[in-house]
Image: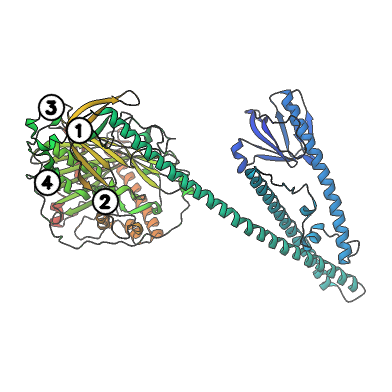
Amino acid sequence: MSEPKSPTPTPGDTYKGWLFKWTNYIKGYQRRWFVLSNGLLSYYRTQAEMGHTCRGTINLATANITVEDSCNFVISNGGAQTYHLKANSEVERQRWITALELAKAKAVRMQAESGEREHRYVKECRRQNGLNGNTKLCFWSYCLSCSHSLSDDSGDDCPAVPPTSGQGGGCRNSEVQSTLRTLNSKVEDLTTCNDLIVKHGSALQRSLSELEGIRVGGDMGDKIRQVTERATLFRITSNAMINACRDFLSLAQNHSKRWQKALQGERDQRIRLEETLEQLAKQHNHLERAFRGATVLPSSFSNPALGNKGGVSGKGDASDEDDDNEFFDAMEDPAEFITVPADPKYHRRSGSNVSGFSSETGMDDQSVNFDELSLASNPESPQPLELEPVRQRRTRIPDKPNYYLNLWSIMKNCIGKELSKIPMPVNFNEPLSMLQRLSEDLEYYELLDKAAKCQSSLEQMCYVAAFTVSSYSTTVHRTGKPFNPLLGETFELDRLSECGYRSLCEQVSHHPPAAAHHAISEKGWTLRQEITLASKFRGKYLSIMPLGAIQCLFDKSNNHYSWKKVTTTVHNIIVGKLWIDQSGEIDVVNHKTGDRCHLKFAPYSYFSRDVPRKVTGVVTDKDGKAHYVLSGTWDEKMEFSRIMQSSKGENGTEGKQRTVYQTLKAKEIWTKNPLPEGAENMYFFSSLALTLNEPEEGVAPTDSRKRPDQRLMEDGRWDEANAEKQRLEEKQRITRREREREAVKAASSPEEGAHQDNYQAMWFEKLDDPVSGETLHVYKGGYWEAKEQGSWDLCPDIF
């Protein structure tokens, strides 16, 4: 309960506080925030509602105040509004009664004075305009036509608050309040004048109608005088209306400029504060790392340069655990390892001749000079030959139209629902399907080409881990939603002559939506994955949780890798600029050797000391010994460092002991390709993404390139694309109902066949993988043979 400073408020003061208001017999008394000001008693559910939502107001000038018992009292204005209120104590109730009685007396006095002024103005107006005593002219017409308002004569309506030294904020507040009262007065003037114009206009029209129906006679003179008098009234009121509008517009323009200037000053100050805060955070980070280096490292390392921090956390994805935590501003998990430069002796001497060399150095490639060690320049892993493209691919698509869309009107009914079950217009989409988006993972296929040539499984793990990170680089600006593929839809990406690989995707399930992907390369690797998306709209942001497994197999070494994707979060769904974040952890496992790479995608935090979109990882063998450290960001580049020695460092902030890795100089393993020119107008597509929906001859009739709604959207015809999208979705629903009816007929009993769908994928079959123990759809063959023969008779009609 908010206690007022004075137990007996003086007239004119604003009195505020908590009271209990009777609502109904179910809820009883509910706590509400009441405000008494200018003879009006208003209430709100909370104090925060005072700026936008008033739940009710009662005018005390015509209200009756009745005391029921020690804490209860009633305020009523004659039946239309009645408030049954209760205070916390008898003292508090008496304070409210005193304040209400004073406010009521003042309101009655002001109303009486207003009536006297109205009578005076009406009398003066009649005298000035020479009207007879039977004419009633409202005092507003006279005072506004003379370019002054009633509020200028009343110090109670708009009191002047002189500024005092040392109270700048109070002066500005008083000035704003005074301006608001003046603007409100002008709005009331406009309303009154509007009513008068309507009234006098109707009367004038009736008089003219009567004048037309009167015959020439003795009544003609009286009627003409009446019409003249009403025309005069109408003219005066119209002039008052024009003057009031002019005054209101002038006031609004003057104060609008001042408020815009003040607002811009506040924005500039906020930007300067944010920049200062960021600089302080960087300085604090630098000092903290220097302190750690001085306390953790041995004395032989004089100037250690602490590298990237990484952590192995078991907390999972923060965006999935707490729906209300959008910006991940909680304290960061303590890093479980840090990296420092290795002693120069490791660069000069062979690993076999180093005294006291740790068994964790991992001498698996028998290299002599560690400073020459580079995975990218392995002498036994020659670079692939540069191939000239067979055909010229397109480099542009039509620019994205600027269509307005009321986002809230569509999304407000979608909270808590599966995204795949919400009918979305193409305004939210990009002109690519999920199958094409899945094929974009192959943009950095060269990493797998290099991995296929590696002699060491640990080196190969570094390339595979970099490939998993590279697949997220295309999402940093891609806020558009891909088209949900129709059941049976396919997409082929044939780059055999240009890049040495080709891939095929198929939508193998609709509920839940699942897509299978198979890619094979002449360089000796095979990539297969099955992805199912679980997505939830949580009001402020959208969480997309990919389910399913990804596997990569190498022919030469028979190494079999598997991993899963992390959670993608789209922030600022309702208000603000959309931005994408990736967070979570990935374990890349080599099922043949037992090698493992643990990657951690750090969620974005405004107060984090690390770079945004940071990714860290450690490559270990089957015994848990670390051999490589990976670090970088998922939107720019990744680097790797060979671990020469490891030791236990000091305890972290939560008592966890961190590992210090002494590494060679970090070298780049992957860098993001630059976006094409004008990408911001083409949905931020990469060079590969621009070619995915390019028309191509010989593809299956179910290929995403032939999807009509997607093609119409790419051409900028969004209204037609929306209509076509609804047609295709309805056709898909009809087809599914037909399959369910066939399943019921084929079943031995209606119960057995109920809710069954006998759909079978065209090019994939569901199998259990004996190596990883996972079940996924695997390519069963036949597509490329059918393409060569041009026989697509078995393909369903989905478009």
Q: How is the image coloured?
A: rainbow
Circle 2 residue: 436
The numbered mark at residue 377 is 4
Q: Earlier in the sequence, mark 2 or mark 4?
A: 4
Horizontal side of residue 375 vs 288, given as left or right = left
In the image, what residue type sits under mark 4?
Answer: Ser
- Pick whichever, 567 or 530, lies toward us: 567
Circle 1 residue: 662
Q: Residue at x 35, y 47 (%)?
A: 733
Q: Please identify the quarter of the rendering in which residue 39 is found.
A: top right
Q: Please identify the quarter of the rendering in which residue 544 is found.
A: top left
Horizontal side of residue 61 vs 276, given as left or right = right
Q: Are marks 2 and 3 in contact (CB under 8 Å)?
A: no
Q: Earlier in the sequence, mark 2 or mark 1?
A: 2
- Look at discs 4 and 1 and give the one toward the viewer: 1
Horizontal side of residue 177 vs 334, given as left or right = right
Q: Where 238 sits versus 608, above or below? A: below
Horizontal side of residue 642 vs 686, given as left or right = left
Residue at mark 4 to residue at mark 1: CA–CA distance: 22 Å
Circle 3 residue: 359
Q: Are marks 1 and 3 in contact (CB under 8 Å)?
A: no
Residue at mark 1 to residue at mark 3: CA–CA distance: 13 Å
Residue 150, image x, y percentages: 78, 54
Q: Earlier in the sequence, mark 2 or mark 3?
A: 3
Residue at mark 2 to residue at mark 1: CA–CA distance: 42 Å
Q: Residue at x 80, y 53 (%)?
A: 153
- Pick whichever, 200 or 58, lies toward us: 58
Q: Earlier in the sequence, mark 4 or mark 1?
A: 4
Q: Where 670 sits versus 9, above or below? A: below
Q: Quadrant of the N terminus?
A: top right
Residue 503, image x, y percentages: 18, 49
Q: Earlier in the sequence, mark 1 or mark 3?
A: 3
